[in-house]
Amino acid sequence: MKPRSLIVSLALALAPHLVAAQATTPCDLVQQPATRIRSDSVPGVGRVSFIGGAVLIKCPARGITLRGDSAEMFPDHDQMIGHAVYDEPRFHVTADFLNYFPLDERVVAAANVHARLPSGSTLDGPQAEYKSARNPRIRTRPQMSAIARPTIHIVQQDSAGKPTPPMTVIANTVLVDGDSTDAQIYAGGQVQIDRDSVSATADSAHIDQPKETMRLMRNPVVRGKKGKPFTLKGDLIDMYSTNRKLNRVVSRANATAVSDSMTLKSDTIDLRVRNDLLDHAFAWGAKRAEVVSPSQHMLADSLDVSMPGQRIQLVKAFRKALAQGKPDTTRFLIEKPDTADWLAGDTITAHFDTLAARGDTTKNPDIRQLVAKGNASSLYHMAPNDSAERRPALNHVTARVITINFDDRKVATVTTVDSVSGIYIEPRPDSTARRNGTNAAAQPNQQQTPKPGQKPAVPSSVVPLPTKPPTKPPTRP
């Protein structure tokens, strides 16, 4: 066929498509050396043109270019087959197959999809759909959606326009509403989010790029990656950033935070982040807040934990506060149920010795001091004066203020202000051993070792001490 005859044939075959395109703006099939075309009428569809040999379609008024190894042109859309490309000023996509619907301003790409937005953000996956906002009568914001676990790399910039590390989102389904920095991103089904400082998983997520917020729903988990890792779980987690830098994470309902220096549990946990490390933590809610460090276990209605550089420094417990610790059993033995030292009060403040551990960043800070105020009471096991005795001395006191000082995690001193009552019990051999002229401490298998279920003997004239911590601070007489 002569070139002029080919042009005439192309014009006749494409006439229905060009008429449809006139509703928007005209598109032209650019003839290539190997272009060949065949047109046929398909029942129920209409006139369909089949084009082979390096297809190139241009829409100059809209800046749209379509490419493919071959194409099928239907009355309402064009299908590019093999090495398909759709390109416009605000969107670029390549795929094995591509459908362009000019009246809807819509593109559907399938198989080996790679899409790029104006901001530089990209999407890779098996199938994606793009809806342009070129015609405001159809839609005012562009949208891109994808299924079958696409991967989105979100390019971000700080307030000065400098690029920041990108964020990666992988999910079963993804919807990007808007483009550039004003996009709203919705992800559902086994969501995985990866940032430079944290990673997150959830069943669904919403990312608000203008507000720099992120909401994770249904079994969410956030993990810190830099420096000292931490993990935060809950039923609902909100993340807040400033200038593309994470500074706050809030977990609501069944919240649990775990770091190298503590485990924090409560109804709500609010973590503050500085330089990619935990700096402060607040815990409160319907459930009692609980914090566990290597040396202390604290309970209260609410907790305030200061931990600069993610090293626990100060813990403040408010309302019905309780602190428990393990006795130092180097000099004595303990038996159930009397196995814990405890301190109770309206409020408790725990100070940790961060200076001593500064040279060794792998070591957790030791407890330095505990201060209980308001209806305070305590029970502590201490080493007996008799070095041969294997039972502990017991120190129980109630007061307005109780201060416990520690030395190498061992109780050094117990001081009180406005004492109400107190007792100190020093263990000694029982009377039977004295009458027999033997030392029970020196013969633990005969007199001192109690039978199963039997507690060590104490002087009969002493009122028994509480072996369990109180459920609430005692009431003053």
Image: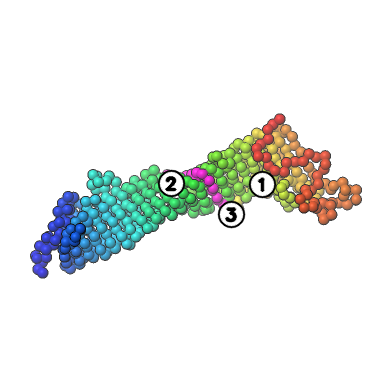
Outermost residue, top side: 477
Label 2: element kind: strand
* Residue visible at 11% across and 60% down in the picture: 12
Q: Any mark on residue 372, and which?
A: none
Whether residue 59 is visible here, answered yes or no, is: yes
**Badge 2 or badge 3: first in the primary sequence:** 2
Q: Any mark on residue 362, and which?
A: 3
Is 143 in front, or is 230? 143
**What sort of colour scheme is used for the picture?**
rainbow
Residue 253 lies in the magenta-colored region: yes
Label 1: element kind: strand
**Badge 2 or badge 1: first in the primary sequence:** 2
Q: Which residues are magenta?
A: 239-260
Distance of mark 2 from mark 3, alpha carbons?
33 Å
Q: Nearer the viewer, mark 2 or mark 1?
A: 2
Residue 294 placement (x, y as % from top left)? 62, 50
* Residue visible at 27% across and 46% down in the picture: 139
Find disc 1 in the rendering and name its residue.
Answer: 325
Distance of mark 3 from mark 1, alpha carbons?
21 Å
Find disc 2 in the rendering and name its residue.
Answer: 215
In terms of image quadrants, where is residue 77?
Answer: bottom left
Whether residue 58 is visible here, answered yes or no, is: no
307 lies above or below 77: above
In terms of image quadrants, where is residue 414?
Answer: top right
* Residue visible at 68% across and 48% down in the picture: 326
Residue 302 placement (x, y as % from top left)? 57, 39
82 lies above or below 253: below
Residue 435 placement (x, y as % from top left)? 90, 48
Q: Amino acid at mark 3?
A: Thr
Residue 287 lies in the magenta-colored region: no
